[in-house]
């Protein structure tokens, strides 16, 4: 098997049985493992009897670690990168390092393995293959609202914390009350659960059931996005300071919509 200087190694997102034999072999054979939290990674290494030295590599020190890892590889050592769970560079550190390694001609490979997004989406039936992955959503309500409006005609996948998911779903209900969603929690674990329903019903369900663990979610594309797109255009013009009559005139001329209907909708804002 060809050897590389640098390995990107997925680790289980919950079930340790998902660790591949190749991942174990690589982590045993390299000289150094770069990891987010050595305490988390050490538990995994102990389980598989791996004794390779670890060094911290997380979002707060990744730039300063680049030179160190480059120097280790330049001295002939081989390095593996892992995150606490799942595949590095998917909402986890690694992009800065990989960019610099490629600039310096370092040979890199990535192993196949656990990924929360793929695990979740493979259990959710969608009408099309395309989707937009937003990672973890922004913190402000207005940014989240804009995101839900922008991708009304596309399946929108994202990660969320159990502390925020209900608030996020309530924001969705406010801008797209008919939206259909899928919410997955505890993926690959004993209490794994995926709920697929209208946003109103999903909110009610999780108000009555304890939420634990990281969340993977999907907002399905709307079958008819015309009204949502119009609302988005109205909101944009309102933010620019246009008045109701002006907005009605602009949108009716640009998009051949009924001027009076647009006017009424602006007044409802």
Image (cartoon, helix red, strand yellow):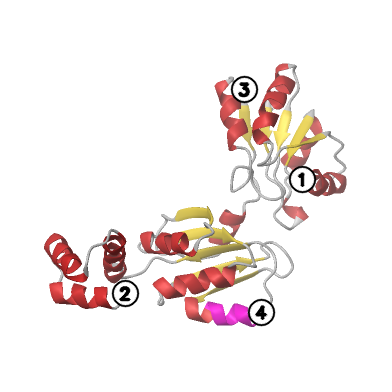
Earlier in the chain: of badge 4 and badge 3, it is 3
Tag 4 residue: 209
Kindly report which numbered mark, 3 or 1, lies closer to the viewer in this rendering. Answer: 1
Say which element carries label 1: loop
Coordinates of residue 120 in the picture (x, y in percent): 58, 61
Q: Find the distance from the CA under tag 2 to the CA under tag 1.
A: 47 Å
Query: 219 or 176: which is nearer to us?
Result: 176
Query: Residues under labels 2 and 3: Cα distance?
Result: 55 Å
Image quarter in which the N terminus is found: top right
Mark with earlier residue (4, 1): 1
Point out the frontmost of discs 2 and 3.
2
Q: Residue 26, can we see it?
A: no
- What span is colored magenta in the figure? 202-209
Say whether marks 2 and 1 touch (CB < 8 Å). Answer: no
Say which residue label 2 marks: 269
| Residue drawn at x 65%, y 61% as measured from the top left | 214
- On whether residue 208 falls in the magenta region, the answer is yes
**Dot 4 and dot 3 residues touching (CB under 8 Å):** no
Left or right, residue 200 beside residue 7: left
């Amino acid at each position: 098997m060809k050897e590389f200087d640098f390995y990107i190694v997925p680790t289980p997102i919950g079930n340790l049985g998902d660790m591949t034999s190749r991942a174990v072999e690589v982590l045993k054979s390299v000289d150094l493992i770069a990891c987010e939290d050595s305490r988390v990674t050490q538990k995994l290494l102990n389980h598989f009897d791996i004794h390779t030295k670890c060094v911290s590599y997380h979002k707060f020190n990744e730039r300063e670690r680049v030179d160190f890892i480059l120097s280790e590889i330049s001295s002939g050592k081989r390095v593996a990168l892992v995150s606490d769970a799942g595949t590095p560079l998917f909402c986890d550190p690694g992009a800065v390092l990989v960019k610099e390694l490629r600039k310096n001609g370092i040979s890199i490979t990535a192993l196949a393995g656990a990924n929360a997004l793929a695990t979740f989406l493979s259990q959710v039936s969608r009408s099309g293959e395309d989707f937009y992955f937003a990672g973890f959503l922004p913190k402000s309500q207005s940014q989240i609202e804009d995101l839900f409006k922008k991708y009304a005609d596309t399946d929108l996948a994202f990660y969320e914390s159990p502390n925020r998911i209900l608030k996020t779903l309530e924001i969705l209900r406010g801008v797209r009350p008919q939206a259909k969603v899928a919410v997955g929690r505890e993926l690959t674990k004993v209490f794994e659960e995926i709920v697929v329903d209208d946003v109103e019903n999903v909110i009610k369900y999780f108000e009555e059931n304890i939420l634990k663990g990281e969340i993977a979610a999907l907002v399905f594309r709307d079958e008819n996005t015309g009204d949502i797109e119009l609302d988005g255009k109205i909101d944009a013009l309102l933010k620019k300071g246009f008045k109701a009559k002006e907005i009605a005139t602009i949108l009716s001329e640009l998009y051949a919509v009924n001027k009076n209907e647009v006017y009424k909708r602006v007044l409802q804002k």
